[in-house]
């Protein structure tokens, strides 16, 4: 199978070749043909398998074959849950569309809307957006979705986890009923399949791998450790192992900041990335991590999707997620594009239930080790961590999604401003 055999245009093949891609991944070879045929598609693929190209490439080809409308109204909308993922998808759209007469833009909250609005006024064919900023600009009359031909819902399960269901339903009412719909995600729960039923029309369902499996190239390991010895253990692993690039996940923003500060005090260059960080700080931290000037990036689950870091060798779960599927997304940051990677989890007694649930989800037992001097506490309770003690609020109400970030526009009454300021802190 080659990209040529999928029926892609010369302009797209030229862009693919420039990026050094020769053979389509399984999700690309399965998804691209039905999308090109104009079919609705429901696709499931692990992170790191190239699913973004699976919808961006055929979408660009379809748009390029249609006559451009005057003033270039938005014809394709890609909805993502986080700023990082939106930025990554936008970068892919620009790269794959380099040799096409196509305009694209990305909009998300947490930054001033001025430059985004200016871009929209120039005319945009493809728009990548997070829900909060999209609805905000539409409410201001700065954006029209009346000419949408293709609607893409990326990381749909994450959308529901972050409480975006009502926002999605609202957006669906703003776009034409006659359109092509594509839904891509790493996992599909019953809720996602229910959502798909309400959005997709007689979809082709494709899967590159069994649901919720982890990439075979990732070597997984668990260190059983006392809770108060986790920080010392992770610093030892990084220093003794000579690790130069490590993505570390914590359960809370406060935990990320605390761990980052301790690492810096021990001579390890580190930066934190989470919802309370400004977009500028998040961009700077990620850029430093990719360039190598920052050795350790400490993140909350907002970064579990959308971080595209080539050849990332190590992912560490400083704390296990209390939602098992998030484990798959976290460790999926390594072992990408066929490269090998290592995923290590530091597990204290109160995370035993989380570990059991993760192993049940992925269908395998993860090897366990104990390091001398960092042994688990034999007297510690195995009672699971309660939500108020570091778990994440995974409610599915509209408010919880909006609190994940949005726009910081300052017009309107004080109550409205309060809501927007909350949203701008995280997305």
Image: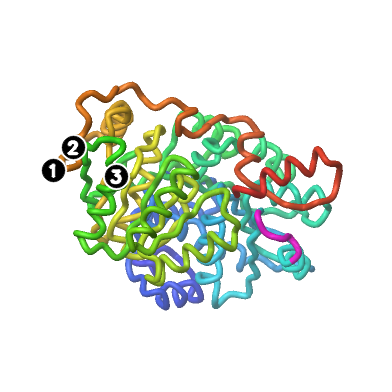
- Residue furthest to the left in view is 372
From the image, tell me which residue sits under label 3: 214
Residue drawn at x 27%, y 37% is 347
Compared across the picture, whether 352 is left or right of 240 comes to: right
Disc 3 element? loop
Compared across the picture, whether 33 is left or right of 427 comes to: left
**Residue 372's mark?**
1
Residue range of the region highlighted in magenta in the rendering: 110-114
Residue drawn at x 33%, y 63% is 267
CA gap between label 3 and label 2 equals 27 Å
Image position of 284 with respect to 302: above or below: below
**Residue 375's mark?**
2
CA gap between label 1 and label 2 equals 6 Å
Q: Position of residue 91 (x, y in %)?
A: 53, 66
Q: Position of residue 390 (x, y in %)?
A: 45, 34
Foreground disc of the pair 3, 2: 2
Disc 1 element? loop
Is the Cβ of the residue at disc 1 closer than 8 Å to that at disc 2?
yes
Residue drawn at x 47%, y 68% is 287
Can you tell which quarter of the image residue 48 is in? bottom left
In-front residue for pair 107/94: 107
The numbered mark, 1 or 3, whose residue comes first in the sequence reads: 3
In-front residue for pair 212/179: 212
Foreground disc of the pair 1, 3: 1
Residue drawn at x 52%, y 66% is 284
The numbered mark, 3 or 2, whose residue comes first in the sequence reads: 3
């Amino acid at each position: 199978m080659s990209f040529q055999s999928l029926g892609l245009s010369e302009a797209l093949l030229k862009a693919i070749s420039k990026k050094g891609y020769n053979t389509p991944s399984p999700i690309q070879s399965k998804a691209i043909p039905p999308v090109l045929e104009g079919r609705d598609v429901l696709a499931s693929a692990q992170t790191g398998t190239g699913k973004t190209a699976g919808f961006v490439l055929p979408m660009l080809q379809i748009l390029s074959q249609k006559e451009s409308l005057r003033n270039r109204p938005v014809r394709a909308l890609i909805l993502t849950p986080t700023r990082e993922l939106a930025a990554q998808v936008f970068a892919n759209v620009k790269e794959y569309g380099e040799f096409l007469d196509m305009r694209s833009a990305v909009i998300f909250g947490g930054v001033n809307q001025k430059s985004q609005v200016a871009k929209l006024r120039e005319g945009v064919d493809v728009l990548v957006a997070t829900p909060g900023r999209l609805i905000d600009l539409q409410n201001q009359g700065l954006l029209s979705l009346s000419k949408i031909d293709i609607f893409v819902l990326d990381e749909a399960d994450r959308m529901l986890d972050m409480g975006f269901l009502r926002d999605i339903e609202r957006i669906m009412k703003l776009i034409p009923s006659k359109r092509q719909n594509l839904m891509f995600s790493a996992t599909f729960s019953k809720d996602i399949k229910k959502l798909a039923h309400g959005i997709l029309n007689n979809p082709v369902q494709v899967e590159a791998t069994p649901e919720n499996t982890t990439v075979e190239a990732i070597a997984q390991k668990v260190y059983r450790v006392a809770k108060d010895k986790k920080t010392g253990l992770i610093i030892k692993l990084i220093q003794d192992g000579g690790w130069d690039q490590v993505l570390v996940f914590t359960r809370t923003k406060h935990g990320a900041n605390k761990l980052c500060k301790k690492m810096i005090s021990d001579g390890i260059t580190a930066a934190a990335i989470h919802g309370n960080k400004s977009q500028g700080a998040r961009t700077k931290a990620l850029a430093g991590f990719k360039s190598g000037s920052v050795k350790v990036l400490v993140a909350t689950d907002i970064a579990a999707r959308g971080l595209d870091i080539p050849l990332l060798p190590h992912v560490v779960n400083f704390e296990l997620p209390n939602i098992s599927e998030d484990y798959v997304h976290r460790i999926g940051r390594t072992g990408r594009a066929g490269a090998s990677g290592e995923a290590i989890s530091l597990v204290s007694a109160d995370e035993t239930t989380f570990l059991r649930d993760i192993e049940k989800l992925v269908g395998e037992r993860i090897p366990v080790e104990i390091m001398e001097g960092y042994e688990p506490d034999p007297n510690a309770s195995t009672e699971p961590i309660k939500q108020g003690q570091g778990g994440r609020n995974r409610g599915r109400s509209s408010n919880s999604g909006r609190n994940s970030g949005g726009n910081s526009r300052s017009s309107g009454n004080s109550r409205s401003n309060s809501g927007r300021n909350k949203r701008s802190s995280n997305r």
